[in-house]
Image (tube, rainbow, N blue to C red):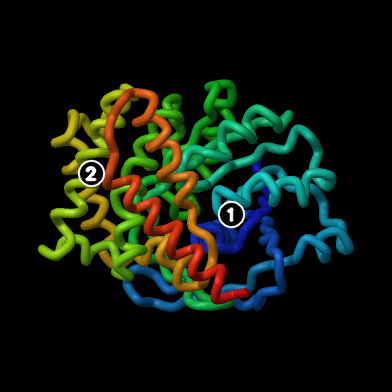
Amino acid sequence: MITSHWILGPGAIGRLLAHSLAPLANLCVVSRRPLPIQQILTTPEGEQKVQRLDILTVEKLAEQAPVAPDAVHITTKAMAAEAALASLAERLPATTPLVLWQNGFLSQPRITRTWAGPVLCATTTQGAYLTGDDGVVHAGHGPTFIGDLNNRHGALATLLAQQLTQAGFETTAVVDIHQRLWQKLAVNAAINPLVALHGIRNGELRNASYQGQANAVIKEVAAIMQAEGIQPPGGGQGETGWLALVWQVVENTAGNKASMLQDLEAGRPTERKAILGPLMQSAAQHGLTCKNLEQLDDQLASEEGAIHQRVL
């Protein structure tokens, strides 16, 4: 029975998850800095719901010494996941289950190798974005899948999937989470860099001025997925299947402001290394060209560099 959760990282998905789980279980959100405990959730229908969430900094967590949780959800950015876990590790029993919610495929295999307890990976197409220190908008519904890379913790994945579904995250426990992480990586790579660089919502990719560039990226991603032996979900095949999948996700999350765009707007580093990096590495291994992906990576790196210079 999972009766208590810690959520490490109060970003968009972290806060959406917290709002969902809070009515069902004991919950603590762990943050790097203080945040208001009165948090506002805006539903996809535009309704606003105010909820009190227990939000503690790592320092306050150490002072108050709450009972260790039944599960820890790490909802930070991919490049921060390992450091975030390290900040809490001494407060957690080594057998504590972790759930990793990162985009890309960077931190998941690393943490799976080093953490003694169960490590589950979650991938979701729930859309969400922040509206300040006290608000999150649930921009669109989407399925969530959960499992572990070594298929050793199916019962735990099933239990968590049931609770997440009850909380409003339609979740399915799966034995092929490795493949699904690659599928999510493919979709993120096809959408996030473009909307971030153009400063648009997901749905605006359907405009004629962006469609051609988006399709060119999708086709590069499809070729890499083919080389990796990863097919799109839902029975699609090859390039046609990936094109259909990505444009369906764009339709489902039309109002969403992608996390990569949120990062650029907030002056934060993006997850480009976790999302584009594995694809470019795979392309090199298989002798494939990926000029569009490389160009997106260069442009994002340039944007991040300009942000860094402004901060200095």
Q: Amino acid at mark 1?
A: Thr
Say whether disc 1 or disc 2 marks the residue closer to the N-terminus. Answer: 1
Q: Quadrant of residue 300?
A: bottom left
Residue ID at (48%, 52%):
271
- Residue 171 in sight here: no
Q: Which mark is residue 238?
A: none
Q: Nearer the viewer, residue 126 or 198?
A: 198
Secondary element type, mark 2:
helix
Secondary element type, mark 1:
loop
| Looking at the image, residue 98 lies above or below residue 35 | above
Q: Which residue is mark 2?
A: 218
Q: Nearer the viewer, residue 99 or 155?
A: 99
Residue ID at (40%, 65%):
261
- Residue 312 in sight here: yes
Q: Quadrant of residue 286?
A: top left
Residue ID at (58%, 40%):
107
Q: Which mark is residue 76?
A: 1
Q: Amino acid at mark 2?
A: Ile
The count of marks equals 2
Q: Image quadrant for the N terminus?
A: top right
| Looking at the image, residue 137 lies above or below residue 250 | below
Q: Is the residue marked by circle 1 packed among few (<14), some (14-19), or many (20+) residues within 10 Å?
A: many
Residue ID at (58%, 49%):
79
Q: Nearer the viewer, residue 246 or 177?
A: 246
Provide residue 85's location: percent of width, then percent of height: 71, 46
| Looking at the image, residue 116 lies above or below residue 93 | above
* Nearer mark to the viewer, of 1 and 2: 2
Provide residue 267's location: percent of width, then percent of height: 52, 71
Q: Is the residue marked by circle 2 packed among few (<14), some (14-19), or many (20+) residues within 10 Å?
A: many
In this picture, residue 211 sits left or right of residue 187: left
Provide residue 263's location: percent of width, then percent of height: 48, 65
Provide residue 218's location: percent of width, then percent of height: 23, 44
